[in-house]
Amino acid sequence: MKPLTIRSKKLGEGIPKLCIPITGRNEPDILEAAGRISGLPHDAIEWRADHFRDVTKPEKVRRILAQLRQILPDSLILFTFRTMQEGGRGDLSAENYLALNEMVLRSGMADLLDLELYTGTDLMPEDLLASSPLHPLLSLARQKGIPVILSSHDFEKTPPEAELISRLCLMESMGCGIAKLAVMPHTKKDVLALLSATLRASESLSCPIITMSMGPLGVISRVGGEFFGSCLTFGTSGQASAPGQLDAEKLADLLRLLHT
Ligand SMILES: O=C1C[C@@](O)(C(=O)O)C[C@@H](O)[C@@H]1O
């Protein structure tokens, strides 16, 4: 795995990067969260724009991105619109999902963009490589020098290890900057499957990887995932964006303790 440097943060090397999601429904709540986060240990924020009630108004989205940059000048800004199919609140057609992300890419106001691997498609995984509707956005992102996280989420279960690895490989083959998986464990073996897939994929892929096993069972993957090849972990301030996220300050302490 080759580290990826974005605005002086090196993902894939050293202590895992800490990302705090912002899930406000309106502008004051979003900016209040950003202000709070500015006083907390973190490397990145994830603006979960699927929670924002005016997400279909491009000028409002750009205004928030500009204000986030002002409040958090040194943080990486990750833009994510998480669809309902993948555990988020987002309810846009595939066309509008692509248009929203294209607008954000063209604005140059986000440092990283999360795109869902299975966006708007009934294609079989083997056809995604040739025909995914994400390809135009992935090329635009390359032109703009903005890394894309290709992501896949399963809030119901943990697919078998081989399937997890093949998803991560597909993401890299499609040209992502970072490959990301979040899955739900029901047993300790599910957690091991996720960690083992992370280790094996990080040994063979060249892009950095972010993985997590959600819920209370998976918490070890949020604290110690880096030992298996995951380069970033999500912690909360206020509302969690997924089950199992730890408080950001406690998580930062744990990460420091484990990586000294
Ligand atoms: O994909 C992820 C990971 C996540 O689902 C988690 O489990 O921490 C949280 C989401 O906000 C983020 O987009």
Image (tube, grey):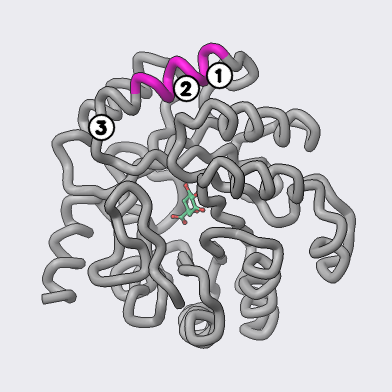
Mark 2, other Cα within 10 Å: few <14 / some 14–19 / many ≥20: some
* Magenta stretch: dominant secondary structure: helix
Q: Earlier in the sequence, mark 1 or mark 2?
A: 2
Can you give x and y, in whole percent of width and height, for residue 181 in the image?
56, 64
- Find the distance from the CA under tag 1 to the CA under tag 3: 25 Å
Identify residue for label 1: 53
- Label 2 sits on what residue type? Arg
Above or below 9: residue 144: above
N-terminal of the two: label 2 or label 3?
A: 2
Would residue 3 appear left or right of 37 to someone viewing this image?
A: right
**Residue drawn at the location 62% of the way across and 48% of the way down:** 115
> How packed is label 1: few (under 14 Cα within 10 Å), some, or many (20 or more)?
few
Q: For the residue marked with disc 1, what is the amino acid?
A: Arg
Q: Percent from the top left, x then y, of residue 215?
A: 44, 62
Q: Nearer the viewer, residue 154 or 21?
A: 21
**Marks 3 and 1: in contact by CB < 8 Å?**
no
Q: Is residue 124 above or below residue 18?
A: below
Tag 3: amino acid: Pro
Q: Can you tell me whether the CB of the residue at mark 1 lies under 8 Å from the nearest atom of ligand 1?
A: no
Which residue is identified by label 2?
25
Query: Residue 73, which numbered label?
Result: 3
Label 2 and label 3: CA atoms lie apart by 22 Å
Distance of label 1 from label 2 (alpha carbons) = 5 Å
> In the rendered structure, which segment of residues is drawn in magenta?
59-67
Q: Quadrant of the N terminus?
A: bottom left
